[in-house]
Amino acid sequence: MLSRVYDPTRDQQDVLRIYREVGWCTKPEHEEALAALVESGRTVVGEMDGSVECMVTTDPGTIRHGSRDLPLVGVTGVTTSRVARKRGLAGRLTARVLADWAAAGSLVAVLGVFEQGYYNQLGFGNGSYEHSCAFDPGLLAVPVKPRVPRRLEGSDWKRMHAGRLRRVRGHGACNIDSPQLTLADMRWGENGFGLGYEDADGELTHHLWCTAKDPEHGPYTVFWMAYRTREEFHELFGLLRSFEDQVRSIEMREPPGIQLQDLLQRPFKSRQITRRSPHENRITASAYWQVRLLDLPAALEATQLEAERTRFNLVLLDPIIRFLDEDISWRGVSGDYIVEVGPTCRASAGRDPTLPTLTASVNAFSRMWLGVRSATSLSWTDELEAPRGLLERLDVAFRLPVPSPDWEF
């Protein structure tokens, strides 16, 4: 495989062919979305027999750990043509791209999965569950009558992206730097539209972007919401409720930190009545995203925990090494470390025979570090082992809010 940076003059038609083969580019607006996607960050292609048969798109940004923002790379697309499947191209190309971003200073990588298992080979571990909700907007119990919103068009993509970056963010929340990615997101969906509100200076304060399978009756899908305050949150949900006369159902991912069932009247009754209908009311859960550390010492140095100081040996295993070509200097994060966690955290190469030892894959350690699952839980279901006393101390140290990227990858 020959890998190189995407060149639009040489590669546009090959990349378009790949996206058509996998079914992701079926309409003219999808071609616009693809063009924005490959321009938003860094796109690398893989050649086989002189033809581009694989591509990986990535975008820089940040991820919030506690109250700190850490450098992030979001893997926004990994695509392989029909003729190049099961040949290792996607894994090797993704590994090379991650190595480049690690060398450039990204501490964490996040991506969305097509199925659990594939990206585990590259050191990624499951993120937390995200709840997908579908409900009748007329059942929203929001004590707010919204003001008349401003209609948002495709030309507002830069303003909407800026609004997304300013939204309220909690633990695990991700921001992607390039506004081109918001433009791409707008072009993928069908019958997209936006509504929002401005302040006296004309700044977009809070807004939402929706798509609609059926513009008349729905379901409408809220692709994202951006708000900063309780009042703005309530106004956007009041706006959704105003669709009730015509729209039968709205689908959305539950906002981080919110239990959407609190805002629904008679949720169990509506679920029973609508069961198996096109507008079924439901709440489902899945872990659609995965995370991994790219630089353990730097990530821990940026970590602050409200816990007593705990020191231990860490034997860290990184499966990505199998996908890294010999010419790549970054070799993953495998190694022996002496780790300290607490109000200050650090990791240095070495081993102290007086300390207890934690043995873990980077997949499992990344999940513990972000607070996806406790150390004890991971010792039952993932690649993580330690003495019981150390597990219990780590359970307390990494007792963090549920992480949520609040961004589609």
Image (cartoon, helix red, strand yellow):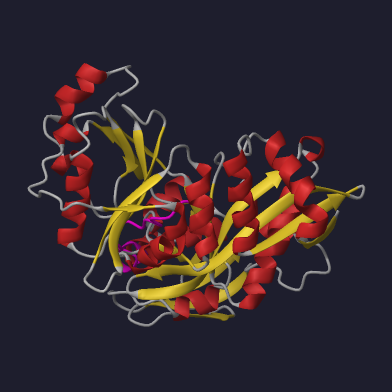
Where does the magenta region start and end?
394-409
| Residue 242 image point, x, y percent | 18, 40
Q: Quadrant of residue 21?
A: top right
The residue drawn where x is 68% and y is 41% is 19
User: Residue at (69%, 56%) from the top-left corner?
Assistant: 94
**Magenta region, main secondary structure:** loop
From the top left corner, tell me how far across and down residue 93 is, in percent: 74, 56
Residue 311 horizontal side relative to residue 315, left or right: left
Name the spot of residue 77 as percent of width and height, x first: 61, 51
Q: Is residue 396 above or below residue 68?
A: above
Left or right: 38, with 348 as reference point: right
Camera-side residue of 53 and 149: 149
Decide: is 393 above or below 291. Answer: below
Query: Who's the residue at 56% across and 39% down the image?
Result: 115
Residue 399 is one of the magenta-drawn residues: yes
Q: Is residue 270 visible?
A: yes
Q: Position of residue 161 (x, y in %)?
A: 43, 63
Instruction: Name the image quarter holding residue 266.
Output: top left
- Which residue is more in the foreground, 88 or 280? 280
